[in-house]
Amino acid sequence: MRILPLAVAAALSACALPSTGGPVTTTALASADAATSLAVGENIFLDRQVTPARDEGQDAMVNLTLRHADGRRIAFQEANQAPHDLFVQQPGGALAQVMAAGVEAPALYRSAAPEGANASFICGAGPAAIGVLEGADGTVRIVGLRQDFQVETLPNGELNAVPYSPDQVCARLNFRQG
């Protein structure tokens, strides 16, 4: 009977990162303010795995898992492929505006788990996406988003991000590495 819990734990950990590839880098994140501590506790872990691009000219696949000390995990994949995703993430773009990041360029990650499959510890049932901004000073800001950004192409061919409702931001978390 002791083998069953180990088998279940191994199966769940195998699902935490959606694809295999490069090594997993783990960063401990400590809550940097009272609101973050209240929302997620004192510490969480950020696991990042980068799978190199298979073909020349493609971007690497970046998988990110937020892991709570009690074992809950939320898996994401970086949105670094489509033109609309790159547009939203540009310095001072729509994601930076939602994150109040000024002219910085945060990264957008989409949920990598089927709906309802994440054992969320932010945003209730789990965010559809998150924005992550890692500062040079060791700070990490994570914003939970209930829905994806909508981008439209204007008649002149330019891209325009549809305004993002503040009601769709479900978490604003501040951490420091370490």
Image (cartoon, helix red, strand yellow):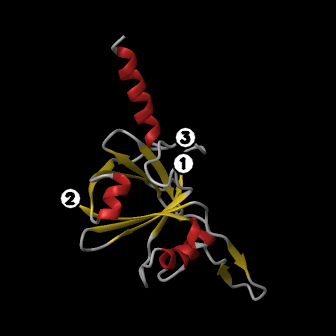
Relative to 81, residue 122 above or below: above
- Residue 159 picture location, percent across and down: 67, 81
* Residue at the far top in the pictured view: 1
Are dots 1 and 2 in contact, CB under 8 Å? no
Whole-angstrom CA distance, mark 1 to mark 2, is: 27 Å
- Closest to the camera, between mark 1 and mark 3, is 1
Q: Amino acid at mark 3?
A: Ala
Q: Residue at x 74, y 84 (%)?
A: 154
* Residue at the far bottom in the pictured view: 156
Name the one closer to the observer, 156 or 139: 139
What quarter of the picture does the C terminus occupy? bottom left
What quarter of the picture does the N terminus occupy? top left
Disc 1 on helix, strand or loop?
Answer: loop
Q: Considering only order in the chain, which callout, 2 or 1, is on the residue closer to the N terminus?
A: 1
Name the one closer to the observer, 47 or 35: 35
Q: Residue at x 44, y 44 (%)?
A: 17
- Closest to the camera, between mark 1 and mark 2, is 1
Is residue 54 shown left or right of residue 29?
Answer: right
Residue tagged by mark 3?
117
Relative to 178, residue 154 above or below: below
- Residue 103 picture location, percent across and down: 43, 85
Residue tagged by mark 1?
125
Around disc 1, counting alpha carbons within 10 Å, would you say few (fewer than 14), some (14 to 19), or many (20 or more)? some
Residue tagged by mark 2?
178
- Residue 132 picture location, percent across and down: 42, 65
- Residue 4 picture location, percent across and down: 40, 16
Q: Amino acid at mark 1?
A: Ala
